[in-house]
Image (tube, grey):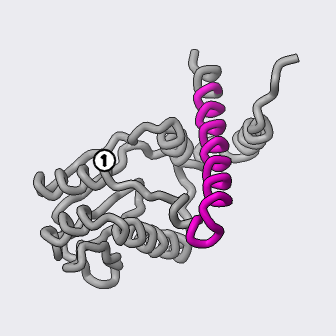
Amino acid sequence: MATQSPFSWLADAADTLRTQLPADFAQSFTPPAWAVAEVQQRVVLLLNHILMQEPAARDRLQRQKGRQVQVCWRDQMFQCAFTPAGLVEFITPEAGAKAADLVLRVNEPSPFELAKTVLQGEKPAIRIEGDVQLAAEVNWLIDHVRWDPEEDVARLMGDAPAHTLVQTAKRAVDALRSFVQQQTQKAAP
């Protein structure tokens, strides 16, 4: 008997969800404004937490102080500015934000396809508009700055439990990626 994927329930749930939702649900669903604002605030907190652990990244961003980057996906927009401390500051639409120096537009409209791309370890297709030097700095950040969740968990639990927990989470993510790739290959004609 073949070993069953630990994520087979996920495939079943996805199939059930896909058959019960209207075909254009993923394209037409818009989350409530309060949920979008909360997620954006949490993204800024996470980015700043990561940047606080990376002095080289903060040094690079200090040179970009006041510059603004906007990320657009479908009808959602996230805009931030770099602070004199080399961190990220969220710019609310109500704050009358100036035109961004750099605009990154995610081309994939489907949240499912976007999630699949990310879970496969790939970068989604993005259209870039604006300042080339700022785009190079942002690209450097994407390529070189990484969050070390094990270090954060170790502060709470100690080194050994943190290592075990993070390794288990990595195996689960790897299994999920493998599952997504297998399902993608099965669905391909």
Does residue 119 sit above or below 141 in this rendering?
above
- Which quadrant, please, contains the N terminus? top right
Give the magenta part as a residue range. Answer: 154-182
Q: Amino acid at mark 1?
A: Asp
Question: Where's residue 187, x and y in %?
Answer: 62, 23
What residue is shown with label 1? 143
Between 16 and 53, the one lying in front of the other is 53
Left or right: 29 in relation to 117: right
Question: Where's residue 25, x and y in %?
Answer: 61, 49
Q: Secondary structure at mark 1?
A: helix
Question: Where's residue 83, x and y in %?
Answer: 23, 77
Name the residue at 67% across, 55% down. 165
Q: Residues within 10 Å of mark 1 (few under 14, many from 20)?
A: few
Left or right: 70 in relation to 43: left
Name the residue at 31% across, 77% down. 89
The residue furthest right is 1
Between 3 and 66, the one lying in front of the other is 3
Name the residue at 67% across, 47% down. 168
Residue 60: quarter of image: bottom left
Name the residue at 17% across, 76% down. 66
Look at the image and say whether residue 162 sits in the magenta stretch: yes
Left or right: 145 in relation to 112: left
Question: Where's residue 115, x and y in %?
Answer: 53, 45
- Which quadrant, please, contains the C terminus? top right
Q: Main secondary structure of the magenta part?
A: helix
Residue 70: quarter of image: bottom left
